[in-house]
Image (cartoon, coloured by chain):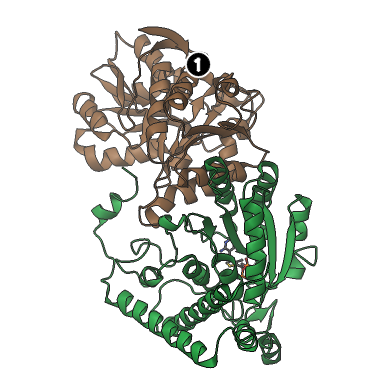
Chain colours: A green, B brown
Amino acid sequence: MSLNKSQMVTLFTNLVRTNEYDLTMYGRMMAGKLLGFYHPGEGGIAPGVGACSFLNKDDFFSPHHRAHGMGHMLSKGIDLKTYLAEHTGKQGGCCAGRSSFHASYPAFNQFMYSGFIGYNFTPATGWGWAAKRAGKQQVVMMCSGDGSYGQDRAHEGMLMASNWRPPIIFWCENNGLAIHARTDDMHPAEHISSLAQGFDIPVEIVDGQDVFACAEAALRAIEHCRNGKGPFFVECKTTRFREHDIGTPDLIEDKPRTEEMINELKQRDPMVIATERVLAEGILTQNEIDRIKDAAANEVADAWAWADAQPKAEPCEEALLAAVYAP
Amino acid sequence: MSRDLPLIEAIREALIEEMEQDEKVFLVGQDLRGTIFPHTSGLVDRFGTERVIDTPISESGMYGTAMGAAHAGYRPVVDFMFGGFTYVTYSEVAVSTGQQYFLHGSQTPMPLVITAAVGAGGRLANDHAMAIHGSFLHQPGIKVAMPSTPYDAKGLFKAAIRDNNPVVIPWHMGLMMDKGPVPEADYIVPLGVADVKREGNDVTVLANSLQLKNALAVAEKLKDEISVEVIDPRTFEPFDMPTLLKSLEKTNRLVIVDEDWENGGFASTISARVMEQGFDLLDAPVTRVTFPNIPVPGGYMEPYIMPNPQKIEAAIRSVCA
Ligand SMILES: Cc1ncc(C[n+]2csc(CCOP(=O)(O)OP(=O)(O)O)c2C)c(N)n1
């Protein structure tokens, strides 16, 4: 499935925007202007953009926590200013400033974020079940890292998807690490996707540093699911350039990752790979790229200005008590 | 019109009526089609495999399916077979469903019902006999109820299915075949309304489910000596505090009977609340009849831990002394 020019421009633009949001988070956290955790995306932002840039608004999706799913969400069409407000405890936050870093956008069929790794696999089964029953050709984009495949939930979700054939795409962003643990130390096979083969779910493995390759795989998986052919598994081989989350030492097992290791990983920077390709294929000129970058910088600055202008969410206890149960 | 039905049949009627009224209601569990307990008997013939769903032995997957479907506008009833099995996916029920509505900005209601058979007395030991209401009562965002009569069973189940929140509603195996009047007409027992099952003046006994039966038997036995008022909470969360306080204005004495461990359960919660809100009404310390902190044993040892009429009578006598 080859991409047309407009699709490539969309992907490139979403990648640049994701990168721009991601980079500001680091500075904000270091300046004490961000609540909760932040899991920097640098080096691993292509899969989320590839997965979500061509979803329909009513497709269900669950972002991976890397870069806090911002690439997934903006690619799906969500305006991230309310996410930034949430991350700073503001009233305009997408979760009313109650969650620190969770995201919930029901209008985009994004219903839950769980700080428990792997907890989205089983509700995804329910979204898939609902999608199948509604018969409106919706799909479920279930994104996660490799580490979440240690959870029984992932296995139960795949088992039930394999039985019921709902339109679920298991989208694994395998960066080779889970905090300090090496993926190849925690999982038996070279590929996480080998697990899916045990459930008879078709698999594709893709270069997770290449946003265009990710998107092509996503489009194939989406088409498979929309055509009622059951679940699909895509494993994106990706990486991360920074520590697991800001403030946690950047170790591999018990040893720091060295500068040489990181430099080696940076040879395959998703931003560089995408830029070279759009230039080489004449999809964008350097001028157009600069304009996309400026627009992204302005978008992110505006989003932060909006979030910063929101009042802190500090409701009274009675208001919170009234918010626990649905009417 | 009303007929006498066993409690389990009253639950079955509630399921059938709600499934007929609202096509978004469906059942998910294990072996519901073949049935382990009779409340799901024949339902697959009536509603088909799309709405009576059997899953693999994957409690998280089974429960997660319900959670996701609830996000998407369905109203699942998740049947765990035995209450103890809810602990297999306790984190989903308690943390994900209970807390996410609030945490995610009160945007997406989670209308689902969690039911299961509970109760000691069958010599099944802990995993198949444990109570669950106290554990879920502890968690914000979840409603918890338990019926003691067929009338309440049907009405509470119907209210639970229509509620827009997760409702944990176990039923006691010791009451499964107990018969009582059940109206044919549509009705609900609203969540959060206790029921004075017997009026009295000297002492209030707050007892639920199987223990309500024991409390009523003791009240009858003592009637010429001590006038016992028996209240059935029916719902643990939200709990009907005004009904209890009103009763204490009259009796000034409280015994709480609860088939659950003493630590951190319903009985302790209500004792503390009575202390805070009704201390001046009390003429004697609140007394609890609960499980000592011993795992629910199998074999012949269940009576060691179970509340029973003798223990309830002793507690009543101690607060009335
Ligand atoms: C249930 C649970 N266990 C452990 C953690 C701690 N934790 C947070 S992120 C993470 C690693 C996740 O790895 P992976 O899914 O591969 O994603 P990555 O962070 O590498 O992008 C762990 C163990 C958690 N949040 N939830």
User: Which image quadrant: the C terminus of chain A?
Assistant: top left
Label 1: few (<14), some (14–19) or many (≥20) C-alpha neighbours in 10 Å: many
Quadrant in which the N terminus of chain A is drawn: bottom right
Q: Which amino acid does label 1 sit on?
A: Glu
Measured from the top left, where is residue B113 in percent x and y? Answer: 47, 35
Ligand 1 is within 8 Å of the C-beta of the residue at disc 1: no
**In the rendered image, is residue A38 in sight?**
yes
Q: Residue A87: which quarter of the image?
A: bottom left
In this rendering, position of residue B228 left or right of residue A32: left
Residue pictured at 63% horizontal, 63% vertical: A219
**Residue A84 location in percent, x, y?**
39, 72
Residue at 51 percent of width and 88 percent of height: A289
Q: Is residue B191 above or below residue A101?
A: above
| Figure quadrant of residue B194 | top left
Horizontal relation, residue A50 to residue B313: left or right: right
**Label 1 chain ID:** B
Residue found at the far right of this picture: A189
Q: Where is residue A155 in the image (x, y as percent from the top left)?
A: 69, 51
Quadrant of the rendered image holding ligand 1: bottom right
Q: Looking at the picture, does residue A164 appear above or below residue B305?
A: below
Q: In which quarter of the image is residue B180?
A: top left
Residue that mark 1 sits on: B9
Residue B252 drawn above or below residue A184: above
Q: From this viewpoint, is residue B82 visible?
A: no
Q: Is residue B277 left or right of residue B213?
A: left
Residue occupying image coordinates x 68% and y 48%: A229
- Residue pictured at 62% horizontal, 26% vertical: B301
- Which of the pair B197/A7 is nearer the observer? A7
Q: Pinpoint residue A55: horizontal percent, then vertical percent.
A: 54, 61
